[in-house]
Amino acid sequence: MQQLVLDMSLPNGPSLANYCAGTSGAALAHLKLWLGRAGSTLRSPVPSYLWGGTGCGKTHLLKALRAALQDQGDKAGWLDADLQAPAEFDETWACVLMDDVHAFSTAQQQVAFNWFVHAQTLQIAVFATGSLPPADLKLRDDLRTRLGGGHVFALQALSEPERRAVLRQTADERGIFLSDEVMDFMLTRFSRDLGSLMELLDLMDGYALQTQRAITIPLIKAMMDNT
């Protein structure tokens, strides 16, 4: 059977609290420490770069940081590879966030470099993510060296046993019974990143309550047929 890839967001949005760090706890602790030092004079302006493969949670952490800043009443500049018309640099930003820099076009690299220069001049932190370590990025030299000039964290996707453990714990907390067969089905037939798996669990729970049925493989297939 062809694997189904679900493009689904987390119900409550990415947050630092719902990021399952696994072996990437140092990066999470770093972001929490920076965020906790509210006020521009207390937060370090040293740039931070998070890198890793698909499913390690790079974008999750960056969006979680942006959401946390918004909750505190702060603004952050945002630039990703899909953004073709970025905003002008704003001196009131609490930080600059750049996602998936490895995919930046020439024009986006120019914007990123300009933002970096402004941010460093004003002692504003830059947080960026990419799929490769800084030295291996195929970017303009002046941008690549700045990305690697501060804190660098390598993120690792959760292993399958870790994903299973998180799913099991979450299901138990919600009073959901997940058989080994159902968990095998989830991990082999759907997107394996934890965000999509947690959203799938949420959908399964809702559909099971709606239909008054236990969560089984036939129920998941019926749910997908009715989606």
Image (tube, grey):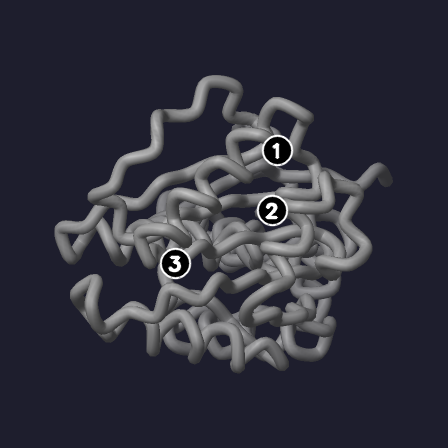
Q: Nearer the viewer, residue 98 or 207?
A: 98
Residue placed under numbered mark 1 in the picture: 109
Callout 2 touching callout 3 (CB < 8 Å): no
Going by the numbered disc 1, the residue's amino acid type is Gln
Residue 102's place in the image compared with 69, above or below, is above
Residue at image point 38% right, 76% down = 173
Residue 13's place in the image compared with 31, above or below, is above
In the rendered image, the residue lying farthest to the top is 85
In the rendered image, the residue lying farthest to the front is 121
Residue 125, numbered circle: 3
Which quadrant does the N terminus fall into? top right
Is 218 situated left or right of 85 in this image?
A: right
Callout 2 touching callout 1 (CB < 8 Å): no
Residue at image point 59% right, 62% down = 50
Residue 208's place in the image compared with 1, above or below, is below
- Label 3 environment density (alpha carbons within 10 Å; few <14, some 14–19, many ≥20): many
In the image, residue 213 lies at what x, y percent? 47, 53
- Label 1 environment density (alpha carbons within 10 Å; few <14, some 14–19, many ≥20): many
Q: Is residue 212 visible?
A: no
Secondary structure beneath dot 2 equals helix
- Label 2 environment density (alpha carbons within 10 Å; few <14, some 14–19, many ≥20): many
Residue placed under numbered mark 2 in the picture: 220
